[in-house]
Image (spheres, rainbow, N blue to C red):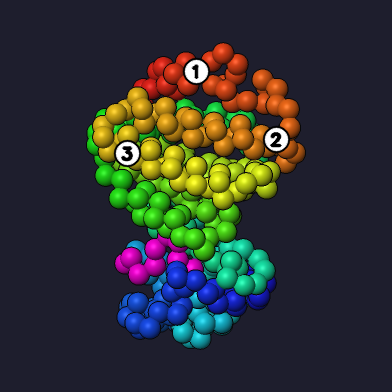
Amino acid sequence: MDDALLDAEPASAGNIAARSDTATDPTTPVAPPPPAATAKAWETVLAHIEAQLAAGILSPGDRLPGERALATGLGVGRSSVREALRVLEVLGLIRTQTGSGPSSGAIIVARPSGGMSILMRLQVAAQGFAVADVVKTRLVLETAVARELAETRAHTAAARELLDAMGRGTLTDTEFLLLDAQFHLSLAEATGNDVLTATMAGLRSAIEAYVIDASAHVPDWPRTMRRLQQEHRDILAAIDAGRPGEAAERVAAHISGYYAETRITDAGHHHTSPTTSDRPPEMAPHSTLASHPALAHPTTT
């Protein structure tokens, strides 16, 4: 991560570095840092940022202050800040973008979760999965998640928080899609099933890679973004209303629709004339969403 990456102070409503209330300033520790003799400097930075996330001072959609500001505020070297940010990115808590200006730097995309999901994410992060396989797996897992949440009337507060963050007009397409991926993970977390959550967390890198690559092939991104936002709202509405079948179908249509619209391949090429083999199973001709195995047999055992 080069120095320019996080030195740029983003100018947006979510710029937490500019908040005047020092009690919520991320460069002000919420607790005394551990003694230097018992913790490396980068671990102090990591613990500080994770504490801010856990306390709700930092939330998904917020940006971290620049590298220089964090180093000065915490009394550590900039190399220690860099190392801590690398760890946070591997854990899926932040995503960074190169360049300069308001869209550069690090954006919060998740809160800390259990150790199991972290382990699973690290295990699969380096593996390359075929896009079609990722889409098929998402259909099986996420339709089951939506159905279970609707059946149990589970709380979806975290998903709603992310949906609100995605509604900010200052987000780039990449930032929006990173929060989108976290939205889907938050639904899995709402089931309380650690194995299911770990599996979704493990797939996160692969999901982010294909949805971001595919966005370059969307002819009208603002229109697509508005459609995706509405689909998210419809999914949550079906869950909250206790309509399992509708919730599962809306999730399937949401995942399949983006794949069909962008038609990205594993080589990153865009197909203008997709064949049946390019489509996920439920997108084949003369089929319906209800005929997909994930919808016909939505068991979670």
Mark 3 = which residue? Answer: 237
Mark 1–mark 2 distance (CA, rounded to whole Å): 23 Å
**Where does residue 17 sit, x and y in percent of width and height?**
46, 78
Let me know if residue 46 appears in the view.
no
The amino acid on which the numbered mark 2 sits, given as a three-letter code, is: Thr
Q: Label 1 is placed on what type of residue?
A: Thr
**Who comes first in sequence, dot 1 or dot 2?**
2
Query: In this rendering, is residue 136 above or below 81?
Result: above
Give the mark nearer the N terminus: 2 vs 3.
3
Q: Which residues are magenta?
A: 55-63
Residue located at (55% from left, 77% from top): 9
For mark 3, does the 10 Å Cα neighbourhood hold few (<14), some (14 to 19), or many (20 or more) residues?
Answer: some
Q: Quadrant of residue 51?
A: bottom left
Q: CA distance from mark 2 to mark 3?
A: 32 Å
Q: SS of the residue at dot 1? A: loop
User: Considering only vertical position in the picture, is 60 above or below 35?
Assistant: above
Q: Nearer the viewer, residue 40 or 215?
A: 215
Decide whether residue 181 is among the magenta residues: no
Which residue is label 1 attached to?
288
Quadrant into which the N terminus falls: bottom right
At mark 2, the secondary structure is loop
Please name whichever residue, 70 or 8, is drawn nearer the observer in this view of the structure: 8
Q: Quick check: marks 1 and 2 in contact, CB under 8 Å?
A: no
Decide if residue 50 is on the left or right side of residue 214. Answer: left
Q: Is residue 163 above or below residue 137?
A: below
**What residue type is disc 3 on?**
Ala
